[in-house]
């Protein structure tokens, strides 16, 4: 094995939120295996690299993880700099460990380059801290999404009890998530926000409550979206709702 595989975080989408190290690796990459929805401006940084799309999107054809692993291993026999470009941060809901284990098991050198995850980009865009003295001393990142033959885990217990919770890959299951959390004891009046395409010029925010989560999800387009729940949102959600009402009347 002569090459090194770099698991690189592409961040939430905005090219200028890439780390300097990520940008430099893309510029020197021989081949890039990239997720779906990575900003074309980010891909353009890898000007001399062969590009291979290996993204996974709910409801659409996805590249099998075992195939991705094999492609990375094979590429390390042919190239010096191999970039596995993942949306957000590689180590959060990115199946990075499976790729790391496969590469290390085959004697391939691996390095991880962190990226900004969507929860932090959304927090920055909303100007709402996910933690706040006296209101939220903990925050949980969860996803209800499970693969075939996988156990559901205890995401529901975590999401029901955390002061602030960010739910990844949940917009398509918003109604079921809301019902499950309310049954688990989370107040139906818990402030909620749905953030689509965080950090990009077309980002959108929708505010409401846990009880109306399905309605918020219905406002989401085709961009990646995350759900934020918690009291830290109450003032921002109130202001956002007032602004939406003003815009509606003005229109």
Image (cartoon, grey):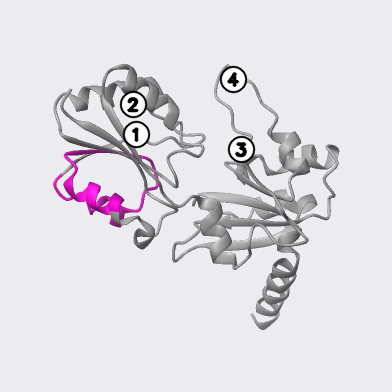
Are the residues at dot 2 and dot 3 in contact (C-beta closer than 8 Å)?
no
The spot of residue 121 in percent (x, y) is 51, 58
On the rendered structure, is 4 left or right of 142? left
User: How far, Cα to Cα, is label 2 from label 3?
Assistant: 22 Å
Give the camera-side residue of 96 and 249. Answer: 96
- How far apart marks 3 and 4 lie (CA) works out to 13 Å
Query: From which residue to which does the magenta span run?
Result: 21-48
Whether 35 is among the magenta residues is: yes
Tell me the number on the disc at residue 54.
1
Label 1 vs label 3: CA separation? Answer: 21 Å
Secondary structure found at label 4: loop
Q: Is residue 181 magenta?
A: no
Distance Cα–Cα, label 2 vs label 1: 7 Å
Q: Which residue is mark 4?
A: 150
Vertical relation: 204 (above or below) 68: below
Can you say whether 146 is above or below 177 in the image? above
Q: Secondary structure at mark 2?
A: helix
Which of the numbered marks, if any, corresponds to residue 143?
3
Disc 1 element: loop
Say whether residue 64 is left or right of residue 195. Answer: left
Q: Is residue 64 visible?
A: no
Q: Which residue is mark 2?
A: 68
């Amino acid at each position: 094995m002569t090459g090194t595989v770099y698991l690189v975080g592409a961040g939430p989408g905005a090219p200028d939120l890439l780390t300097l190290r990520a940008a430099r690796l893309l510029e020197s990459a021989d081949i890039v295996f990239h997720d779906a929805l990575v900003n074309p401006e980010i891909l353009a940084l890898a000007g001399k690299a062969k590009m291979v799309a290996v993204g996974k999107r709910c409801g659409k054809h996805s590249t099998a993880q075992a195939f991705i692993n094999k492609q990375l291993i094979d590429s390390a026999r042919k190239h010096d700099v191999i970039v596995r470009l993942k949306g957000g941060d590689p180590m959060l809901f990115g199946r990075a460990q499976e790729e790391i284990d496969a590469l290390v098991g085959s004697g391939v050198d691996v390095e991880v380059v962190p990226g900004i995850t969507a929860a932090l980009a959304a927090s920055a865009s909303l100007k709402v801290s996910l933690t706040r003295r006296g209101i939220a001393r903990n925050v949980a990142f969860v996803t209800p999404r499970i693969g075939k033959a996988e156990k559901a885990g205890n995401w529901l217990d975590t999401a029901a009890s955390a002061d602030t919770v960010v739910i990844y890959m949940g917009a398509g299951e918003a109604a079921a998530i809301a019902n499950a959390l309310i049954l688990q004891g989370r107040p139906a009046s818990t402030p909620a926000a749905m953030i689509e395409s965080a950090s990009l010029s077309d980002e959108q925010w929708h505010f409401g409550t846990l009880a109306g989560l399905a309605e918020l999800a219905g406002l989401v387009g085709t961009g990646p979206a995350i759900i934020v729940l918690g009291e830290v949102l109450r003032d921002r959600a109130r202001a956002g709702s007032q602004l939406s009402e003003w815009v509606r009347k003005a229109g």
